[in-house]
Amino acid sequence: MKKLSLLMLSAILLTACQAQPRPSSPDETRPASDQSFAWPEQGQRFLVNPETSELRIVVYADGPLARFGHPHVIGGAVLAGEVMLAEPFADSALRLEIDVSAMEVDRPSWRSDEGFDPEMSDSTITDTRNNMLSSSVLNAEQFPLIEIKSLAIGGPAWQPDVDLRIELVGNTRELTVPITLQIDDELLVATGRMLISQRDFGIEPFSAAGGNLAVADSLLIRFRVVADIQKE
C-alpha cells in the first residue's frame, strides 16, 4: 500500500493532467498529401509579431485516477512567420513557426482563464516543462520548431476554413481549421482553436500507475496570430 501511494504521488507530480478529465474528440487529421505549398507571388505581406501573438495548449488527464491530477496550460509568445493576402482571397497563404524551447508552463493568469486553480508549485512546473521538452514528447533538441503551412483557404474572409499542414517531431499531418480573421489597413489578427491527437504525431502520452493515470491524448490548442503589414 505504501509503495502504491508513493507511485501515485510521483505520477501526480510528473504528469500534465487535471482533476476532472474533459471529454473531447480530436479534430480529424489526415496523412500528408501530395499537395504542394504555394506562396503567392503578389499580395499584401503581413509579418507575425511574436510579442503580441500567443499560443496556449491545455493538457488534461485521462484514466481511472484522473481525478488525482491537475491541468496544465503551456504556450506563450512563441509564434513567428508571415501571412500573404492575395486576390482572390482563396489564393492567400500563411507559414508559421513555433519555438518549442521558448514555451512556458502554467502562468497563473493562463490557468485562471481556463477556470483552473491559478497556483502551481515551482517543482511541478519545472517537472512538467522538462517532460514536455524531453525526447519522449516534443524532443526539443532534435526538433526545435513546429512548422505550420496553409495548403488551401475556403469560405469568407472573416471566418475562413484553412487547410493546414503541421510538422511536429518529424511527423506531418493535415487538418482543416476554422479561423476568425480581422483585417485592416495595418494589422491582421487571426484567432481560433483546435483539438489534436498526440498519437497522430507519433507521441505516446505519458502514463503511470499501470496506465490508470495518464496524460490525455487530445490537446486543446488556442491561438492568436497578430501580424503587421509590410509596406514597400
Image (cartoon, rainbow, N blue to C red):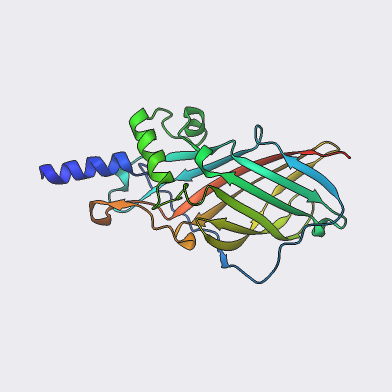
88 or 19, nearer to the observer = 88
26 or 100, nearer to the observer = 100
Coordinates of residue 161 in the picture (x, y in percent)? 70, 57
- Residue 197 in sight in this render: yes
- Residue 178 position by quadrant: bottom right
Residue at figure coordinates x 40%, y 51% from the top left = 135
Location of the C terminus (image quadrant): top right
99 or 26, nearer to the observer = 99
Residue at figure coordinates x 65%, y 41% from the top left = 224
Of all residues shown, which one is farthest toward the front? 142
* 34 lies left or right of 14: right
Coordinates of residue 37 in the picture (x, y in percent)? 71, 62
Residue at figure coordinates x 58%, y 41% from the top left = 55
- Residue 121 in sight in this render: no
Coordinates of residue 102 in the picture (x, y in percent)? 53, 37
In the rendered picture of this protein, how many numbered marks are placed on residues? 0
Coordinates of residue 149 in the picture (x, y in percent)? 67, 56
- Residue 20 position by quadrant: top left
Of all residues shown, which one is farthest toward the left? 1
139 or 6, nearer to the observer = 139
Q: Is residue 62 shown above or below 199?
A: above
Location of the N terminus (image quadrant): top left
- Residue 123 position by quadrant: top left
